[in-house]
């Protein structure tokens, strides 16, 4: 992974949940590195993968497509994919504009970014 990418992602395990915390800005330039993160989630094969988006300031269609693919994979394997918020406005807008916000289970882990 290129220098600096590791500050954008942190992967940890909490019991039967794999948590992927994303920070900062992710775009097409990060696609290859993100694929390694998604591989980790697939290989862990835990009942739940939680993707913490609460500190993600920007994401584009690369992340959205990856989340959709992970959702389909988890569903096919009888596993759950949960997005953790509160979502930053730009990330929330990405899901709303594309009509995908209802496709995901989104759980808020604290106060909204602007409270």
Image (tube, rainbow, N blue to C red):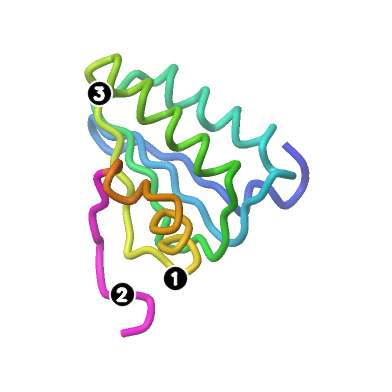
Residue 105 drawn above or below residue 71? below
Q: Position of residue 18 (x, y in %)?
A: 35, 34
Q: Position of residue 91 (x, y in %)?
A: 47, 60
Q: Mark 3 points at which residue?
A: 79
The question of residue 48 being in magenta is answered with: no
* Mark 3–mark 1 distance (CA, rounded to whole Å): 28 Å
**Magenta segment, which residues?**
105-115
User: Total label count?
Assistant: 3
Marks 3 and 2, the one that precedes in the sequence: 3
Mark 1, secondary structure of its residue: helix
Q: Which of marks 3 and 1 is in front?
A: 1
N-term-proximal mark, 3 vs 1: 3
Question: Which residue is disc 1 drawn over?
Answer: 89
- Dot 3 crowding, Cα within 10 Å, few <14, some 14–19, many 20+: some
Q: Mark 2 points at which residue?
A: 112
Q: Which residue is drawn at 36% across and 30% down?
A: 71
Q: Is residue 16 left or right of residue 50?
A: left
């Amino acid at each position: 992974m290129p220098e600096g990418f590791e500050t954008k992602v942190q992967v940890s395990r909490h019991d039967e949940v794999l948590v992927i915390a994303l920070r900062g800005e992710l775009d097409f330039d990060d696609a290859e590195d993100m694929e390694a993160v998604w591989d980790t989630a697939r290989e862990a094969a835990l009942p739940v993968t939680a993707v913490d988006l609460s500190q993600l300031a920007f994401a584009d269609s690369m992340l959205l497509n990856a989340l959709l693919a992970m959702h389909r994979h988890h569903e096919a394997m009888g596993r759950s994919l949960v997005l953790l918020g509160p979502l930053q406005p730009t990330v929330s807008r990405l899901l709303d504009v594309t009509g995908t916000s209802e496709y995901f289970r989104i759980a808020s882990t604290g106060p909204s970014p602007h409270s």
